[in-house]
Each structure stands twice: as structure tokens, then as C-alpha cells.
Amino acid sequence: MHSDTEQKKLVVLASGNGSNAENLIRYFSGSGLAKVTCVVTDQPGAGVIVKAGKLGVPVRVITRRMATDGPNMLHLLEQETPDLILLAGYLRLIPEPVVRTYHDRIINIHPALLPAYGGKGMYGAHVHQAVFDNREKETGITIHLVNERYDEGRILLQRSTGIEPDDTPDSIAGKVHALEMEWYPITVQEYLSAG
């Protein structure tokens, strides 16, 4: 870690439209505590590329093969020297060499209350559909550290929201998204401050 006076460097890994990534960039841009210095995506058409670009944050587009190649991924990240790596809708399993090198310095946000609705294939709309199909009374978000297995790292924060009888998978997604927007930056900030 850098000294306290230096801004912490955050690298965001994203695969989708980038609303969480954009939220993190905006939140930390004026904080003095940390700054998103790079966004890495494995999707050449991802919306996050445009969003990050508009906010002046460089984007590295990697191939799917590179994303799963531990030494290659590690080399790319080491060039960025991040204090923390933040996953924002990033769908690939982080290779073991990266998890080992950045032990307790990779954070993910998951759109359900883990351990429920976690694991491979459980992301985005798939999660909200499963929650809806099972007629759950609540759902929420889990912010956790990343280990070698999907969605099993130490939990930093969970927040829940109720599900009404007239909710749909889309309205459930909206409620969960609101929690993500509110709590992900705050949790990252608290984790950095505690570190």
C-alpha cells in the first residue's frame, strides 16, 4: 500500500454497461482518498468503455483468453499498480495467480444475499429471475472479497430490500441496482480507510 498522503489507485474490472464502474469513478474523483486509474473489460462492445472514456479514465480491452490467463492478467494489473481491484459486473473468474498476489485487495459486488443465488452462472438478470421464480420475500446485495471460487470470499457488507407481490424480475433488478449504487462506493471507501 502507498503512504496515507498518496491517493490510492483503484482498477475496475467490468464486462457490462458500466453503471457501477461509472458510479465508482464519479464517487472517488473528488474524494482525495482514491481514484479509479483504469478500467479493464473483456467485452469490446461493453458500454463501460464509453462511460469511462467520457470521464477521462483509460480503458484496457482484453480478450477472453487473456482474462483467464493468470500470468498475462497479472502482468497487465502490475502495470497499473492498483491498491484495490474492484469488480463491477465482471463475469470472469479471477485467475489464481491474481487472487494470490492481490490477496484481500479484490472486491466484488453480487446482486443477491450470498450464499443464496451465488456461483457460476449466477449474475445479473439470471439472479433476479431466480429470486422471482422462487417467490423470495427479500433480496439484496453482497459486497465481498474475492477468492479462488465464485462468490465465496469474506463478506464485507450485505444490504437487503423487500420484494412485493407485484414485483417483476425487472423491478427487483431496479431495487438491487439502487442498493449497489448507494453501498458499493461507501464500502470500498471504508475498506480503504480501515486498511
Image (cartoon, rainbow, N blue to C red):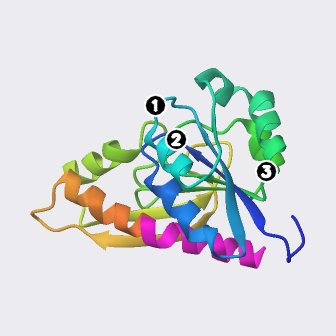
Which residue does the image show at 59% across and 60% down from the upper left?
144
The magenta stretch is: 181-195
Give the spatial CA distance, label 1 vs label 3: 28 Å
Which residue does the image show at 15% across and 61% down from the upper left?
167
x and y percentages locating residue 187 in the rendered image = 58, 72
x and y percentages locating residue 75 in the rendered image = 82, 34
**Residue at label 1?**
45
Q: Quadrant of residue 160?
A: bottom left
- Of all residues, the one furthest to the right in this rendering is 3
Give the mark nearest the N terminus, 2 or 3: 2
Give the spatial CA distance, label 2 vs label 3: 24 Å
Q: Is 177 positioned to the left or the right of 60 in the image? A: left
Are the residues at dot 2 and dot 1 in contact (C-beta closer than 8 Å)?
yes
Considering depth in this image, is 65 or 156 the residue closer to the camera? 65
SS type, badge 3: loop
Give the spatial CA distance, label 2 vs label 1: 8 Å
The answer, for residue 115, to whether it is visible in the render is: no
Three-letter residue code for mark 3 = Tyr
Considering depth in this image, is 40 or 151 the residue closer to the camera? 40
Which residue does the image show at 28% across and 60% down from the upper left?
174
Three-letter residue code for mark 1 = Gly
Three-letter residue code for mark 2 = Ile
SS type, badge 1: loop
**Residue at label 3?**
102
Q: Nearer the viewer, mark 2 or mark 3?
A: 2
Residue neighbourhood size for the residue with mark 1, other residues' Cα within 10 Å, grouped as few (<14), some (14–19), many (≥20): few
Q: Which mark is residue 49?
A: 2
